[in-house]
Amino acid sequence: MEQPVPLSGGGVGGVGGVGGVGGVGVGFRPELAADLLAAPSAVDFVEVVAEACFASPAARREAAAIARIWPVVPHGVKLSLGSAEGVDLDRARRLGALCRELAAPVVSEHVAFVRGGGREIGHLTALPYTLEAARVVARNVAAARRALPDIPLLLENAARTLRFPDDALDEGSFYAEVVARTGCDLLLDVGNVYANAVNAGVDPGALARSYPLERVAMIHVAGGAREHGFYFDTHAHPVPEPVFALLAAVLAATGPVPILLERDGDFPPFAALAAELATARALARSAPPRRSPPPAPPPASAADPPPGAAALAAVQARVAELFTAPRAPSPADVRPFAADEVARSRAILQRKRVDDALPLLPRLASHREAAARLGARCVEASPRAHRLAAVADALRIAAAAAADERLAAEALVDGLLLRARFVGPAADGSVRPRLLPFIRRERLPGGRVIWAIKGMGSSADVRIVEPRR
């Protein structure tokens, strides 16, 4: 491992970590469930993606069950705290309800926007590094807090695929403004710091030193890979040695804050993840004791739109249009943004759509490469839905796979289960939860017949019944 880069700065919190959470954790995923339940002492806490619990009653019940074993940290990805048009208060209320249901000790979200100009981008998009953007985040955090329980809200730094021409602050100074104006501590994603540094051609240690490390209360770490000269924080590769080295350097400044390993795909044998968790735990244990952080300033109010919000809203609407338009824009059309950065961001979003849709098709997803190729063709040929986009994409993928004899059996079952819970897609691509009861059958290749049965309400269980032949 590379030698840690010395960092300066204070520490945070007490020995127990933030909200009573400490030690090391992992993002809870179905692929890890059996191994984690067999060895619960491998982690001290787990994180669940809040939107997965909103989309799947089964995932929500699972989160409630594991909350009896470990502290569970809900992690939001679609609240869009950086949207200049304002935060979606209905999403905030749903996130607050989930936190209360899980007795969550802490909740986290991203300093990013995922919608602009009425368009859903579908992925976290970093903000311009400006005072106006920091003020917008503060306004939205203040609004969201009113729907959340009285627990710490941690804000995560985002990876950057698009540079804004009007950046007025460096990266670390921007996040210092965010924590000062919101009163929130940071969930520092070391993998994102590393990615941004490598892609900008700067030293990762120097970039980390520019952050307000005295306000770091939790750390994310994940693997990544280089593609065509660009480093992506993929969450689907082992954590590279330089990222562990940067983690050690950050911990030397922050002290032993809670560390969470993110892994969302290409899951290795659990022993490999356990080894990464052990490395993170050893680095935290070797860190110096934490010192008390400076007192947080009072958070901003959720009053009138801050200065510059209208201009920022226009920029975000333009970015959302560039990222989601069915046809790729020409280099002239993307100005003042860089054409290669827009093209890269569009490609990432297409891949993200497939990554979001395939977990909703668990049987089809077992044909990993074939399902991924088919999914890529489906999302490329259709615009992103404005609501429940992952469900709309999954329904399209299932319909296309049903025409492939190699995939038909799994696709028909997955598609039937989705149709039991959702109505659509409509002509405009939209999908909505199915409130009424549902009973329908599907004939599978070979002549088997299965029935899907759902009761009243969008969260009612769906049963699969296969009559005896």
Image (cartoon, helix red, strand yellow):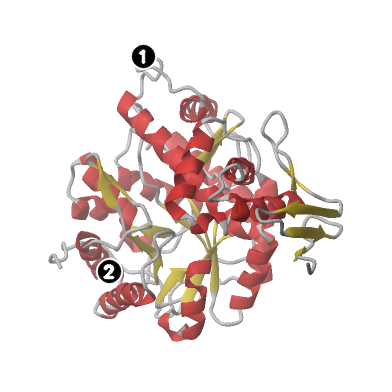
Note whether 311 is above or below 17 in the view shown.
above
Q: Residue 255, located in which quarter of the rendered image?
A: bottom left
The residue wearing badge 2 is 251
Foreground: 453 or 435? 453
Instruction: Report how far apart the C-alphas of labels 1 and 2 lie in the structure.
Output: 45 Å
- Give coordinates of residue 252: x percent, y percent: 23, 69
> On residue 332, which mark appears?
1
State the residue in front, 194 or 272.
Answer: 272
Task: Report the amino acid beneath label 1.
Answer: Ala
Residue 162 drawn at (x, y percent): 36, 34
Q: Is residue 300 visible?
A: no
Secondary structure found at label 2: helix
| Residue 369 shows in the view | yes
Work out which residue is located at the far top of the displayed protein and give it: 332
Comparing 267 with 457, the one in front is 267
Q: Is residue 193 left or right of residue 385?
A: left
Assign a secondary structure to mark 1. Answer: loop
Q: Residue at x 38, y 29 (%)?
A: 342
Q: Is residue 364 above or below residue 118?
A: below
Would you identify the image quadrant in which residue 200 lies? top left
Comparing marks 1 and 2, which lies closer to the viewer?
1
Residue found at x 20% / y 62%: 7
Query: Is 429 located above or below residue 42 in the figure?
Result: above
